[in-house]
Image: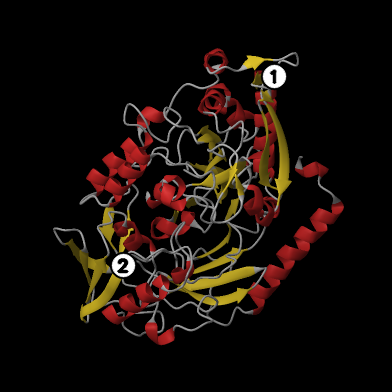
C-alpha cells in the first residue's frame, strides 16, 4: 500500500501522535535545555517501547546496548571482546573461576561510585529474577576487594563471557521495584522523562567515563513503522525505522541506511512422530514433518532469494542457519536452494509418491501441514503465504494460520511455526537445539534431539576459549556426517535474514555498524559515540 492510499483516519491518528509527543517534549524544555532543532539533539523513531522497561536484570539490553547502564565487557564490530567497566579479567585453568577487575573512576548518573558491590548485586539480582537472563550455572558471586569480583561457575561455560558483555550493571543503593521505570546507571545516557506510549527523553550522563557522543539529548518517539515513516517524511525525526514495503520511497533530506542482520525468520518443524509428552500431557510431533526426507526436501525446494525479493522487497538475505555470518557459524551449511528436482528425487527415494492431486503421499498420508505465525506480524504472514504457494507448486500442501503468542504456545509442539531468532550470543544454539530444552518455554519446541549434537554443544559450552568453542558450535551444525543444519537433521527451514532499515538525516553519519541482532531493543544506538554531523 502506498502513502497516497492511506486513509484519512490514519493520517489524523498519526498527526495526533506526533503533535502529542512534540507537545510533551517542548513543554518540558526548561531554560538552558537543548532545543530539538539544535545539532546536539536527535529525535529518533527506531523501535517500540520496551514492554518491561529498562532493567538489565530482567532482560533489557540483551539485544543491543543497554544505553543507561554500562557492561563489564563489550563486543566490538568484529565481535572481539573489549573492556568497558572492566579493566581486566582472568579465567582459572579449570574454567570455573572468572575474576574481573573494574575501573575505580566510574560513577552512576546520580554521582555515586560504581564498586564491586554493585556488580555482585546486579548478578545476584539477575540470577534470582526468574527471567530470560540465565545465571543458574553461577554458584557464587563474591567481592574480593572494592574493585574486583570473582564468579564461580558450576562447570566451565565459554558463553559466560557474552553475559559479561550484555548484562548492564545496576546500582545497589538505588535499586527498587520501580527501577525498570526509573533506571540509574553508569552508561552514556540518563533518563530525563518517560511519557509512556509516546516518548522517552534522555540526556548525557555527566559522570560517564567513556567516549562521549556529540549528542547531548535524545528523544525516542514510540511510533509504529508506518507512523515513523510519516514522521520522517514530515521532517519530525532524524532517524526512522521503516518496513521493507516503505524503504523504496523517497524522502527529501533523508537517506536509506540498510543494516545487515542475523534477525532471522524460519520454520520450526515438529521433529518426532505424533505422541504425548508423558511429563506435560501435551501432544507433540507431527506425522509428516517427523520425516527427515520431508524436512530436507522443503529446505532444498524453497526459493529463499525469491522470498527476499517478493516479501522483503530485496531488503534481506537468504538464511541457512540460526547464526549466519557470526563467528560461530559453519559456512558449509549454506547451499544453493530452489533445487526442486533434487528435492523431488529425495522424496521418491524415501517412499513418497505423487497422488492424483499431484500431492506427495506415503502410506496413505498426504504431505500437508498447517503453518502458524503471529497474527499481528505482517512480514511473517507474507512469508508464510509465499512459502505455502511455493510448496503447493512443489507438491506439499501448507495451510497458513495466524494466532496469538498464547495460542501458539499451545500448539507449537505439534504444529510448524514461523519463528524468529538472532542473537550475539551462541548460547542461543544451546537453547534452541539441545535436547535438555525440549518443550521448555519457546526453546526447542519441536523436541529435537541428536546425542552427537548435544555432545558438541556441551563441548562448546565447556571450552576454555572462544576459538575452541566456535569450532564445536560449528561441528554441532555439521561435522561431515551429522548436525542440526539442513545438511544433517534439518529440524528447521531457515528462510530469510531481515535487513534493518532506517531513513537517516542525510547529514547524519552513524558510522559502521555490526551485524544487527533480533529486532528487540535499539541496537543501532550501540556506537552512538561515533555518530556525527557531516560538514
Residue 177 at what x, y percent from top left?
52, 82
Res. 441 image quadrant: bottom right
Q: Name the residue under label 1.
A: 359
Residue 375 x, y percent position in the rendering: 71, 48
Frontmost residue, 470 versus 496: 470
Count every numbered label the image shows and give the total.
Answer: 2
Q: Closer to the camera: disc 1 or disc 2? A: 1
Observer-nearest residue: 330 or 477? 477
Residue 234 place in picture, x, y as percent: 70, 54
Looking at the rendered image, the quarter that the N terminus falls into is: top right
Q: Residue at horizontal 27%, vertical 78%? A: 116
Q: Sequence order check: which comes first, mark 1 or mark 2?
A: 2
The foreground one among 206 and 274 is 274
- Residue at 73% over, 64% down: 17
CA gap between label 1 and label 2 equals 52 Å
Residue 15 vs residue 377, the one in the foreground: 377
Query: Where is residue 301, by image quadrant?
Result: top right
Tell whether 442 sits left or right of 230: left
Residue 512 visible within the image: no
Residue 49 as seen in the image, left or right of residue 20: left
- On the rendered structure, is 313 left or right of 460? right
Mark 1 element type: loop
Q: Is residue 51 placed above or below 444 in the rendered structure?
A: below
For disc 2, the marked residue is: 138
Q: Residue at x 42, y 29 (%)?
A: 488
Task: Write down the quadrant of residue 389 in the picture.
Answer: top right
Query: Which residue occupies 53% across, 38% down?
Result: 272
Amino acid at each position: 500500500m502506498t502513502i497516497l492510499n492511506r486513509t484519512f483516519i490514519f493520517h489524523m491518528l498519526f498527526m495526533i501522535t506526533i503533535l502529542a509527543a512534540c507537545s510533551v517534549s517542548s513543554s518540558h524544555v526548561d531554560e538552558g535545555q537543548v532545543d530539538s532543532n539544535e545539532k546536539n539533539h536527535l529525535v529518533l523513531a527506531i523501535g517500540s517501547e520496551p514492554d518491561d522497561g529498562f532493567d538489565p536484570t530482567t532482560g533489557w539490553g540483551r539485544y543491543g546496548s543497554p544505553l543507561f547502564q554500562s557492561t563489564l565487557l563489550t563486543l566490538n564490530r568484529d565481535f572481539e571482546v573489549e573492556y568497558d567497566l572492566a579493566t581486566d579479567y582472568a579465567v582459572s585453568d579449570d574454567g570455573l573461576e572468572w575474576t574481573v577487575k573494574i575501573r575505580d573512576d566510574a560513577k552512576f548518573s546520580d554521582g555515586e561510585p560504581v564498586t564491586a558491590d554493585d556488580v555482585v548485586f546486579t548478578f545476584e539480582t539477575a540470577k534470582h529474577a526468574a527471567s530470560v537472563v540465565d545465571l543458574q550455572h553461577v554458584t557464587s558471586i563474591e567481592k574480593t576487594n572494592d574493585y574486583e569480583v570473582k564468579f564461580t561457575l558450576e562447570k566451565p561455560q565459554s558463553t559466560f563471557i557474552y553475559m559479561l558483555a550484555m548484562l548492564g550493571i545496576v546500582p545497589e543503593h538505588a535499586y527498587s521495584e520501580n527501577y525498570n521505570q526509573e533506571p540509574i546507571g553508569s552508561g552514556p545516557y540518563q533518563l530525563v522523562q518517560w511519557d509512556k506510549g509516546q516518548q522517552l527523553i534522555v540526556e548525557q550522563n555527566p559522570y560517564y567515563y567513556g567516549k562521549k557522543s556529540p549528542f547531548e539529548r535524545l528523544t525516542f518517539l514510540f511510533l509504529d513503522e508506518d507512523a515513523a515513516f510519516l514522521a520522517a517524511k514530515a521532517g519530525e525525526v532524524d532517524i526512522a525505522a521503516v518496513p521493507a514495503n516503505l524503504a523504496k520511497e523517497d524522502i527529501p533530506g533523508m537517506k536509506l541506511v540498510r543494516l545487515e542482520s542475523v534477525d532471522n525468520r524460519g520454520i520450526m518443524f515438529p521433529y518426532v512422530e505424533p505422541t504425548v509428552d508423558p511429563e506435560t500431557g501435551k501432544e507433540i510431533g507431527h506425522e509428516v514433518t517427523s520425516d527427515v526426507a520431508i524436512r530436507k526436501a522443503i529446505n532444498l525446494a524453497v526459493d529463499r532469494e525469491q522470498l527476499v525479493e517478493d516479501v522483503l522487497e530485496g531488503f534481506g538475505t537468504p538464511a541457512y542457519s540460526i547464526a549466519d555470518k557470526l563467528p560461530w557459524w559453519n559456512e558449509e551449511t549454506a547451499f544453493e536452494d530452489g533445487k526442486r528436482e533434487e528435492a523431488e528425487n529425495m522424496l521418491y527415494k524415501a517412499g513418497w509418491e505423487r497422488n492424483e492431486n499431484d500431492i506427495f503421499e506415503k502410506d496413505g498420508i498426504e504431505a500437508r501441514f498447517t503453518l502458524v505465525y503471529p497474527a499481528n506480524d505482517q512480514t511473517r504472514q507474507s512469508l508464510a503465504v509465499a512459502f505455502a504457494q511455493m510448496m503447493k507448486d512443489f507438491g506439499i500442501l501448507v495451510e497458513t494460520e495466524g494466532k496469538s503468542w498464547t495460542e501458539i504456545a499451545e500448539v507449537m509442539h505439534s504444529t510448524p511455526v514461523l519463528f524468529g531468532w538472532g542473537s550475539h550470543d551462541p548460547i542461543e544454539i544451546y537453547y534452541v537445539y539441545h535436547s535438555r530444552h525440549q518443550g521448555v518455554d519457546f526453546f526447542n519446541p519441536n523436541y529435537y534431539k541428536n546425542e552427537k549434537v548435544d555432545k558438541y554443544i556441551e563441548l562448546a559450552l565447556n571450552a576454555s576459549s572462544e576459538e575452541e568453542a566456535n569450532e564445536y558450535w560449528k561441528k554441532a551444525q555439521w561435522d561431515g556426517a551429522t548436525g542440526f543444519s539442513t545438511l544433517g537433521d534439518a529440524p528447521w527451514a531457515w528462510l530469510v535474514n531481515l535487513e534493518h532499515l532506517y531513513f537517516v538525516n542525510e547529514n547524519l553519519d552513524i558510522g559502521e555498524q555490526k551485524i544487527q541482532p533480533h529486532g528487540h531493543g535499539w541496537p543501532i544506538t550501540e556506537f552512538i559515540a561515533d555518530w556525527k554531523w557531516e560538514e
